[in-house]
Amino acid sequence: MTHTPEKEAVIVTVKAVPSLFDELAAATQAMMPETREFPGCIEAHLLLAPEREEMVIFQIWESSEAQSAYLTWRAERGDFERLGELIHDEQIFRTYTLG
C-alpha cells in the first residue's frame, strides 16, 4: 500500500503598510496566475479587505512538499523580499491538513 500525500491548505493574513494597500494588493494579484500554474497547486485565491488594509491569501496544495517547493521558488526569485517592503506587520502564516 502506497502513502498518498495529504493535501495542505495555507492561509496567510497580511497587513499592508498604511497607504500602500493598493500597491501590495496589485503586486500580489499579479503573482496569482503563476501561483495557480505552479506544480501541485490546486487552488489559490486572494481575499481583500481594503478598509482594514488587510488581505488573506488562501491556497490548497496537493502536498506540503509541493507548497514548500513553491515557497522556495518564490524566495529564490526575490518575490518575498520585494513584497516585504509593503507589509506592515509580520504575516500570519498557517497551514492545515485538508480533512
Image (spheres, grey):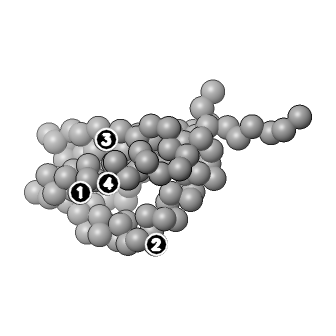
- Measuring 38% from the left and 53% from the top, which residue is drawn there? 34
Q: Earlier in the sequence, mark 2 or mark 4?
A: 4
Asked if residue 16 shows in the view, the reply is no
Quarter assignment of residue 79: bottom left
* Image-based side of 43 in relation to 8, left or right: left
The amino acid type found where label 1 is placed reads Ala
| Neighbours of disc 1 within 10 Å: few (<14), some (14-19), many (20+) | some
Q: Helix, strand, or loop for circle 2?
A: helix
The answer to whether 90 appears left or right of 9 in the picture is left
Numbered tag placed on residue 74 in the rendering: none
Pointer 1: what residue? 27
**Residue for badge 2:** 76
**Label 4 secondary element:** helix
Label 4, label 1: how far apart the Cα atoms are: 7 Å
- CA–CA distance between discs 2 and 3? 22 Å
Mark 2 and mark 1 lie on one chain; the one further toward the N terminus is: 1
In whole angstroms, how far apart are the C-alphas of marks 2 and 4? Answer: 15 Å
Q: Position of residue 5 (x, y in %)?
A: 70, 41
Q: Which of the image's four quarters has the C terminus?
A: top right
Query: Which SS class for mark 1?
Result: helix
- For label 2, count other residues whose C-alpha is less than 10 Å away and answer few (under 14), some (14-19) or many (20+): few
Question: Mark 3 highlights which residue?
Answer: 46
Quarter holding the N terminus?
top right
Q: Residue at x 84, y 38 (%)?
A: 2
Image position of 30 with respect to 46: above or below:
below
Marked residue nearer the N-terminal end (3 or 1): 1
Q: Is residue 63 left or right of residue 92?
A: right
First in residue order: circle 4 vs circle 3: 4
Name which of mark 2 and mark 3 comes first in the sequence: 3
Q: Are circles 4 and 1 on residues that touch, CB within 8 Å? A: yes
Residue hosting label 4: 31
Mark 3 and mark 1: Cα distance apart in space: 11 Å
